[in-house]
Amino acid sequence: MPELRKDPIIERWVIISDERGKRPLDLVSPASGRKEPDYCIFCPGNELTSPNEILAFRNPDSDGTAEWTLRVVPNKFPALQSTGETGEVTEGMLTMMNGIGTHEVIIETRDHTLSLSTMNTKSAEDVLWAYYSRLKDLKKDNRFKYIHIFKNEGKDAGASLEHTHSQLIALPIVPKRVQEELDASLEYYNSNKECIFCNLISRERELQKRVIVENDDYIALSPYAPRAPFETWILPKQHQSSFQPYNTNFSGLAEMLQTILQRLDRHLEIPPYNYLIHTSPFSKEENEYYHWHIEILPKLSRRAGFEWGSGFYINPTSPEEATKLMCQL
Amino acid sequence: MPELRKDPIIERWVIISDERGKRPLDLVSPASGRKEPDYCIFCPGNELTSPNEILAFRNPDSDGTAEWTLRVVPNKFPALQSTGETGEVTEGMLTMMNGIGTHEVIIETRDHTLSLSTMNTKSAEDVLWAYYSRLKDLKKDNRFKYIHIFKNEGKDAGASLEHTHSQLIALPIVPKRVQEELDASLEYYNSNKECIFCNLISRERELQKRVIVENDDYIALSPYAPRAPFETWILPKQHQSSFQPYNTNFSGLAEMLQTILQRLDRHLEIPPYNYLIHTSPFSKEENEYYHWHIEILPKLSRRAGFEWGSGFYINPTSPEEATKLMCQL
C-alpha cells in the first residue's frame, strides 16, 4: 500500500509509492567517470580564465611555487550583480529588488579526475572551510540576508562543468523553503521549548529505521518524507543553529559527507546529485529553534522525485528501504 | 542588472537574470517530432493492454464500429491505490496516511502522430471535457479533497510514453502549493474584498507588458515572477473559483491553450513542457477569493528554471522578453 507522508517540519506531503514497479536500482542513470579533459577552465594552468580569485588554499609543502589546492572565484555568468543597492520597489501588488548579490564558485581541488567523494578527507575538510570562510566574509556586507551554499554534481543535476565545484549565492532575501523551515521551527519552539530538529534526531535514534550512520558529532538519516529516492540529511547531533565548525574543526563533517557520497556512488553507480546547506539567516544566526543541516538529493531518474508543480512529490523508494541499502558498507 | 522579483500571490522570490549569457533560443533542447511507432500501448488495437476503461469518447460518425477518440484508463503504475480508507496516523511528530487515491491517464487522441498543439480544436476541447467529467465523478468520493490534473509533454518533462496523454491524481490532501495560494488569496480577500487574481488580471491588462493573448473569456500572460523561461498562465477573465466550462463549453479555453502551445512549438522548437491546473479544493469549490488557472512550464534546459532546493529559482529570460516573442504569431 502506498503511503502519504507529511514532512514533520513543513507542511509538505509526499507519496511514497514502492509499488510503482521500480526497484531502486532500476532508477539509476549511467555512471559518469571523470577523465583528464582536453581543456578545462578550472584546471591548473588556466587560472587566468577565471580571474579575480576571491580565496585560495595553497599547499605549504610544495617547493617554491605554492600550488593552489582549492580556489574560490566569481561565477562567470553570475545570477546576481555585486555592486549597487537592493532598492526594493513595490508597485501595487508587484515587488522587485535590484538583483544584488554575489555568485561564487568553489573549485574544490586542482585534480580534474577527483570528485568530492574520492578526494582525500583533508581536501573535503578544506571545501567546508572555504564555505565557512566565505560565509563569515560575506556576512559583513549588510545588504545580504542569506548565503545559499549548494553543489550540483553531474550534468543531470545541473552541473555545467565537470571539474568538481560547489557554488554559493549571497542573497538580499531568505529563500522561501528556508523561511518556511524557520517559521515552522520557531512555532514549534514557542509551543514546546525545544528545537524540532533536536527532537527529530532523538526520535530517529530511538526508532533506528532511518538512521544511516553516526559519528561523534554528526548523524546522517533518510528523512521521514523524502522528496526523492535516497534523499539524505546530515545534521549536527548537538543543537547548532548555523553552519560552523564543531570543536574548531570540520573533520567529523567532512568524514560524514564523504561517507554518504561514497555510499551513493557505490550503491547507485555514481549518481548525479544536488546538495544544499540550510542554515539560519544572518539576522539571527544564533538561536534555540533552528538546526542547520545538509540536504543531499540524488537525481536518479527524470520522473522519480519529480515535483509535479504543486509542491507534492512521488517517491518510488521508501526512506526505510533506502536506509537499508545505505547502511551497507 | 538582474532583478529579484516576488510572486504577487505567494512569497516566492525568483532571480530574473537576463545577463547570464544565454538568449532564449540558446536554451532550447532538440525538437521531438512524433512518428508512427512500432508499438505503443496507447494506440488503437492495443486497448486490452490498458484495461478497465474509465471513460471514452467515441466518434458518432464512424460506420458500425464506433471508434474511440479519447480514452481515460487507470495508470498501470499508480502512485496511489484506489481501495481502502485514508486512516491518518500520527506518531509523535510523524504523520502518515494510507496512499488512497486514483491515478488515471487521459489518452487524448487515437492518433499517435498528433500532440495537444497539433490536434484539431474539437479534440482539444474533448480533453478538457474529459478532465471536467472525471473531476465531477471523483468529487462524489468523499475520501478525496483535491484532483491534481497535469500533463508532461516530452521525455525531458517526465513523459514516459510518447503518445499524447495527460494524467490526474485524486488526493486525500490538498497539495502544498495550491494550499499556499488558497491561504494567500483568502488573506488578500479578507483585507481587500477582492480576488487577488482578478486584480492581477486587470493590472496586467492595463500595463500590457506581460499579456500574451486574450480571447472573449480567457487571458494568457507571463507571470511577473516566473520560475522558468516562458512560463505562461491561462486564466478565465471573469472570476471563477474552480475549473469548469464557461457558458457551457470549453471552446474558448481549448483555443487559448492550443494557441499558447502552438506558439511555444513555433518559437522554441517544440519544447518539452509540463502544465497543471490549479483549482479550488472540493471542500469549497465555489468561493470569492480563489481563481482557477493553468500553469504551463516549458522545460528548456536543465539549468534554467532549476529549483535550487530552497524554493528559489534563477530564470535567465525575463517575462517581458518572453512575452514579446510569444506575442508573435
Image (tube, coloured by chain):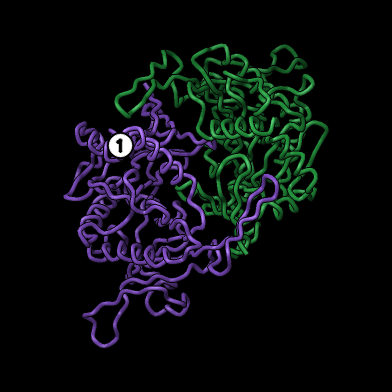
Chain colours: A purple, B green
Q: Position of residue A247 (x, y in %)?
A: 20, 58
Image quadrant holding the N terminus of chain A, namely top left
| Residue nearest the observer in this picture, A200 or A280 | A280
Query: Callout 1: residue from which chain?
Result: A
Badge count: 1
* Position of A98 relative to B146 (above/below): below
* Position of B46 relative to B236 (above/below): above
Q: Looking at this view, name the residue that lies furthest to the bottom.
A: A64
Q: Position of residue B237 (x, y in %)?
A: 76, 33
Rendered residue at 23%/45% (across/down) = A219
**Residue B197 found in image quarter:** top right
Q: Secondary structure at mark 1?
A: loop
Rendered residue at 28%/33% (across/down) = A320
* Position of A214 relative to A99 (above/below): above
| Residue nearest the observer in this picture, A195 or B5 | A195
Rendered residue at 63%/20% (across/down) = B285
Residue that label 1 marks: A193
| Residue nearest the observer in this picture, B251 or B91 | B91
Task: Classify residue A58 as left or right of residue B250.
Answer: left
Q: Amino acid at mark 1?
A: Lys
CA neighbours of label 1 inside 10 A, class few (<14), some (14 to 19), many (20+):
few
**Residue A276 in sight in this render:** no
* Position of A263 relative to A207 (above/below): below
Q: Position of residue B27 (x, y in %)?
A: 60, 56
**Residue B131 in sight in this render:** yes
Task: Classify residue B93 as left or right of residue B319.
Answer: left
Q: Position of residue A297 (x, y in %)?
A: 38, 46
Task: Classify residue A231 as left or right of residue B190.
Answer: left
Q: Looking at this view, name the residue that lies furthest to the left.
A: A216
